Amino acid sequence: MCIALISTAHPSYPLIIINNRDEFLHRPTSAPDWWPAPNTHVLGSRDLARATQGTWMGITTHGKVAVLTNYREQTSSEAIGTHSRGRIVNSWLTTPPRERQTTHDFVQSMVASPEAKQVGGFSLVCGYINEPLAIVSNRSEDMDHITWVAGEKNTTRGLSNTSVDDRSWPKIVDGERYMEQAIAEHVDKMEDEEQLIARLLDVLSIDTLPRLTKLEDGTVDTYINHLRKSIFVPVIGAHSAREQAGQEISAAHVEDESKNPAAAHADGVNYSTGMYGTQRQTVLLAQPNGRVRYFERTLYGNEAKAVPKGEGDRSFEFTLAR
C-alpha cells in the first residue's frame, strides 16, 4: 500500500514529494539513475519484472514529475492488469523534451485511452514542477474527475491506494499531518537540507500496522485491510520454498538484463507472492531557482535481503533545463 505525500508548505522548497514504495520484496527493481538513451532526460528507478520496465516515480531534466499508486483490491492477484501500470508513467516522462506537452493534454488523452483501462487500477500524480499537478485515475470518466494539487502555497495532500477523495484511510490523514509537522520543525530550527531529508524519511518510517499475528506468519492478503492504517509497512511473510524459487527467477532476470539491456522480462512471471513491505523511500525537493534534489533509500535488495541503513541511499542533484 504505497503512499505519496505532496506539499507546498516549505518556504524554501515550493514542491516536496515523498513516497514509499510497498511491494513484494523479490520483485526485481533497478537502482535510481538516469535512464539509457533515448530517455537520458529521465531520472528514477525502474520495475524490471515486466517488459515495459516502467517506474512508479520519476522526474525529468525539464521538470516533468510523476508518482503512481495502485488501487487496493481485495486480494493481491486482483491488482494485476493485462499491461503494466509503469507504461502510463513512462508515457508522460519519456516524451522528448522538445515536444512540450501540457499536463492537461496528457491527462485528457489518458482519460480517453482504452490502453489505460487495461492495467490494474491506479492513481497518477503528474505535471511540471512550479505548476499545478493533476491526479488522474484510470477509473476517471472525464476531465471533471481530475483533481489538481500543489497549485497554492501551504498545502499538503496525501494519496495512497484508494480514490483521491477518500479521507477514511488513517495513513493518508496521518501522513499529511506528520509531513507538515516535519516541515514546520525544520523551518523553526533552521536546519539544513540533510536534516530535512532525515525528517521526511522519519515520516515515511512511521509504523502503526496492527499486529494480527507474527508478521512472518502472515501474508499480504491477511493484512490487506489493515495496510491503510500505517505509513510504513514492515515485512510481512517469511522466506519459503516458493519465494526462494521466485528469488532465483528474479536473479536470473537481473543477470540477463545486465548482459542484454534490451531484453524484456517476461510478463508471465508472478511476483505477487512472498515477503511484502516498504521497499523504497523517495524524497524529491524542488527550489525556486530550478535546483532539484532527488534522494532514494533502498531498504531491501532484489533478493529480499535487508540493506543496512544508508548503504542503499542514492542522491542526485541537478538544475532544471530552461
Image (tube, rainbow, N blue to C red):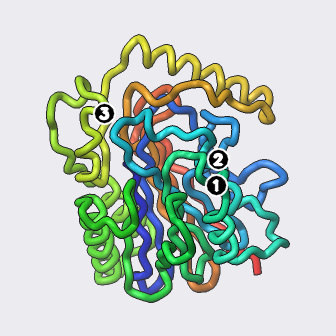
| Label 3 Cα neighbours within 10 Å, binned few <14 / some 14-19 / many ≥20 | some
- Helix, strand or loop at disc 1? helix
Q: Earlier in the sequence, mark 1 or mark 2?
A: 2
Residue 13 visible within the image: no
**Label 3 sits on what residue type?**
Asp
Q: Are marks 1 and 2 in contact (CB under 8 Å)?
A: yes
Compared to 157, does 9 lie above or below? below
Residue 187 image position (x, y, % from top left): 34, 82
Q: Which mark is residue 54?
A: 2
Residue 109 image offset from top left, x and y in percent: 68, 67
User: How far apart, in angstroms, are the residues tagged by discs 1 and 2?
Assistant: 8 Å
- Residue 42 position by quadrant: bottom right
The answer for how far apart the CA atoms under marks 1 and 3 are is 26 Å
Quadrant position of residue 29: top right
- Give the label on residue 221, or none: 3
Q: Residue at x 30, y 29 (%)?
A: 219
Residue 123: x and y, percent? Answer: 49, 59
Above or below, 75 against 7 in this view is above
Horizontal placement of 87 versus 159: left or right? Answer: right
Q: Is residue 187 left or right of residue 300?
A: left
Crowding at label 1, few (<14), some or many (≥20) Cα neighbours within 10 Å?
many
Marked residue nearer the N-terminal end (2 or 3)? 2
Amino acid tagged 2: Gly
Quarter of the image with the C terminus is bottom right
Q: Secondary structure at mark 2?
A: loop
In front: label 2 or label 3: 3
Q: Quadrant of residue 321?
A: bottom right
Whichever of labels 1 and 3 marks the residue nearer the N terminus, that label is 1
On the image, numbered disc 1 is attached to which residue? 88
Q: Is residue 223 left or right of residue 293?
A: left
